[in-house]
Structure formats: structure tokens, C-alpha cells
Amino acid sequence: MPVADGRSDLIRRVEGLTGTVTFEHEWVVRFGYGKTRPWVHRDTDPDGAEVIRAVAGPDAITLAGDRLPKGVEGRHQDGFEVTGGETVELVMTWSKSWEGIPTRPDVEKALRHTETVWGDWARANSYDGDYCEQVVRSLLVLRLLTQEPTGGIAAAATTSLPEEIGGERNWDYRFSWLRDAALTLEAMLEVGFREEAEEWRAWLLRAVAGDPENLQIMYRLDGSRELPERELAHLTGYAGSTPVRVGNGAVDQHQNDVLGEVMLALDLARRSGLAADGDSWALQRVLVENMIDKWRLPDHGIWEIRGPLRHFTHSKVMCWAALDCAVRAVEEEGCDGPVERWREVREEVKADVLEHGYDEELGSFVQYYGSKTTDASLLQLVQVGFLPPEDQRLHGTVRRVREELADGPWVHRYLTASGVDGLAGDEHPFLACCFWLVDALARIGDVTTAKQHMDQLVAVMNDVGLLSEEYDPHGERFTGNFPQAFSHLTLVRAAHALHAAEKSAEPLGAQARPDDMEAVDDAPVAREDADPGPEGGDHD
């Protein structure tokens, strides 16, 4: 896929090294998720070269190249041989159907230019620890999931690749979740990519412009809001996994943690020296005030749980993180705002979590208030500095996640057998959670185990360094949408945390401060009861 303004080309180049190799190739074009059969015909491009062109409505795809396939019963297929020293090129180009037939690009020039652009970009990162190759591959994935010119970051490049082969946990991830995009921004900033951070900040301001009451958890890559979910009954799905979904019904869910992720990303942007933006801080003030009104409400949680709304511990902690960022913006960065009130509410939230989200008997934080179950999202409590890294409540939580959700480096999000998510079937270890565990272990001082896990995780990356959403260690295969931003961004952050921990004599934690060591008033705080909520499509 060459870097070129105004063109959408996919190039396949075959170079013969030695001997003779026979290739079979087939070209079948469908639009509208397979429903629309185009008009396919042979034509000539502006240079007089023969091409095959497929047209349907506003779309046209042109195939140019050295060995064009022959038309056979509604499809184009053929075979050809490549010998040593010979090169065969095929170029597929999308264009608007009313435009002229595109010219064939200079493939050698396009290849050199693409290698130069991506090589220069990758070398600009500042990371110098172990796992450099895997970090660079992950950064490239995150950049390639970013739409130009809008700056919107897709959660993944695909829809409906199943979390369980033959199961129903199949979702459309081709949208920009505020959470995932914010975490991607943090990963980029940690390795020095400030321009990308500015692009995303501008996208955020456009996407969420308006009444904060109408804030969505996800948007289209151009910032538009409509993502209606529907099922494509005419498609059998990957390996018979149905339904195949387009759009995502989780768009209407209430997820309290999202604002925390956004605030953390924008806080890191400020601390990384990103140029001040008055509109950005004005938006953050509005979002914080809106969050103050809603933090006591139950929600669907980070995993977009279907069924009853609950007081998820992770969501409450991320509300605390949002307030913590706001307080520090005033105290340390000179931003304006009602810091006394924000500080007071921050302590209210923390007291509420310690009172209702921590189980003394279990010695760990729990998935939601009143439960006895654990959740891998609780590993983020270490990252955000909710408690200092030496606090035994964090250590107990990490230990319990390892005991109940993990098998070595392989970590599940939660116990699906509990029925908490309202879905049938099971799922495999979630790669983002696996890297969260590495991150948490590094931050609390267990660098040896963290490194052992990291070695095992990066070993399953495919031949070009890609990761999906989940991994089946028994079947040794990826599952879920692919490539997955969440998996790659958590790899980058885990490598960064591990590198920092190896250089430090003290546990890292996050933004832990001396006052975090003090006892917190744990008087109960009034909360609204959980009510059944609407169902929506899963994510992450």
C-alpha cells in the first residue's frame, strides 16, 4: 500500500530469485459486503495499457499489471510462471466510478518512497529499551489504523472476526473508541510522537463538540456519530462464526471510565510539552463537571457488559483519575478551575472505591461493588497511581488476577462462566490484559516475572509483527479482530514500563504522591442503585 496523496493502490510484486515458480491467481470483486456484483470489463488506461475494470454505482476498482487473469464464468483467474531474475507486478486501484481510469504507478518508485516514508517515521521514536523491534511494529500498526486527514484512530481494521470460533462474540471494530484512541495517544507520546498527539486532540475536539450530555463512547473515523448495528444474514462468517455485524450497538452505552482515559491522555500531552490549546482545556473542564454529576451512576464498564448496569470498580477508579488529572492541571500546570471542589470530589470517589470496591476478606479489589469476582481491568489501578505501588491492596489484586484469570502470561478479561456479560460461549485470553499484567508486575517491582511474560507474549506475534484481539494458546492461533490497536498499544506501554522499571531501584507506580500514603476517609458515599440497561455490542 504505497504512500500517495489522492490514490488508493494495493500493489503485489513477485520477484523471482532462482528456479521457476508457478502461481495461480484469482480476482473476484464484490461491493456491498458481497451483495453487489459489479460490471467487469476490459479497458485501456491513459497510457494505452490493458486493464480490467469493475464498476458498481459510485465505486470502481481497476486491475493493472503484467499478467492479467482471464475471465472465466464470472470471475478472473489464471496461472503464470516466474523465473529467476523476473518480476511480475499487479496493481489494484480504487477510484470514483465517474473519474477516468487511473494510470498505473511506477511500482519501483512507489516502493522506494513508501519504504523511506515509513522508515523515517519509525526511526523518529525515542524508545531505546528491549523489544525495540516489537515496539516499532506496534507503532506502525497504530499509525496505519489512523485515518488521514481526520486523525481518527480505528480500534481494528476488521469486523466480526470471532473471539471464539463458531461463537456469537463477533463485533465491528472499524470505529474510533475514545478509550482506545486515548490509550493510543498515550503510547505514542511515551515514545515521542507529538504530531500524532496533536492530530488526535484536534479530532477529539471536533468529534465531541456540543453538549457533553450527548458524548458517545465511539465515533466514526471522520467524527460522525451514526453507527447503527445490523447483521448481514447472507454472510456465513469466518469459520462459520455468525452473526456478521456492521455498526456497533454499544455506541449508546454509558461507560464512566472513558472520561478518565481521555483526561489521562490529555494530561500526558500537557506534561509532554504539547502546545497549549484553550479549547482543549475548556472541553476538559466541561467533561469533568459532567463526570462529577454522573460518577455515582452504574454503567456498562470497560468491557461493554450486556444486561444489568453495575458499579464497576474500574469505572469508579477512572473517574478518580479524571479528577486527579484536573486537580494536577490546576496545581502544576497553571490551568484555571475550581480546584478545591475537584479535590474534594476526588477524595469522595477514592473513599467510595476503598469502601465498596475492595474486599478485605479476599485481599483484593473486586469487579463491581458487592461482588466476589475479579477483573483484569483492575490491573490499571497500578498504572493510574490510585495507590502507591507498594500498597498491599494492589499487590493482592495483581495476585488474585493471576490466580483466577491467568495461566502464566495468558490473562482472561473476567470469568465468562459467571454470566456477567449476558452472552453465550467463551473467549480466549485477551492480549491487552496480558500486557497489562506485564505492566503491573513491572510497576510493583516484579521485573523478573514481567520480563518472562513479555518474552512469551512477543513470541506469538506473526511473521510481520501483528497481533489480534485474543490468542488461543492451546490452538496456537489468533482470534478476534485483526490487527488490534488495543493489543499493540498495551505492548508499547508494557515495554516502556518494563524498561523504566529495569532502570529504577524503586517500584514505579504511576503518579503516586506522598499524600497517597495517608489514610483516606472511607465514609460511605451516596450512589444511585444499579438498574437494568440496554443491550449493546461488545468491544475490547
Image (tube, rainbow, N blue to C red):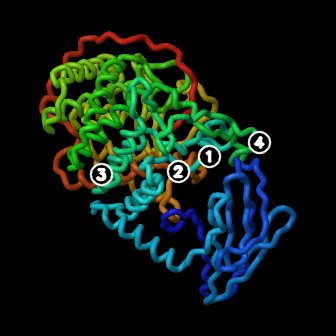
Residue 161: which disc? Answer: 1
Give whichever of 85, 471 is nearer the camera. 85
Q: The N terminus is located in which quarter?
A: bottom right
Count every numbered label the image shows and give the total. Answer: 4
**What residue is disc 4 on?**
234
**What residue is disc 2 on?**
468
Please, what secondary structure does the residue beneath circle 2 have?
loop
| Dot 1 or dot 4, earlier in sequence | 1
Q: Residue furthest right?
A: 73
- Using the image, determine if residue 517 lies above or below residue 467: above
Task: Where is residue 281? Give x, y as percent.
Answer: 25, 36
| Dot 3 or dot 2, earlier in sequence | 3
Task: Where is residue 237? Give x, y as percent.
Answer: 70, 45
Task: Where is residue 328? Give x, y as percent.
Answer: 18, 34
Give whichever of 241, 319 is nearer the camera. 319
| Dot 4 or dot 2, earlier in sequence | 4
Kind of residue indicated by mark 3: Leu
> Residue 357 is drawn in which quadrant?
top left
Please, what secondary structure does the residue beneath circle 3 have?
helix
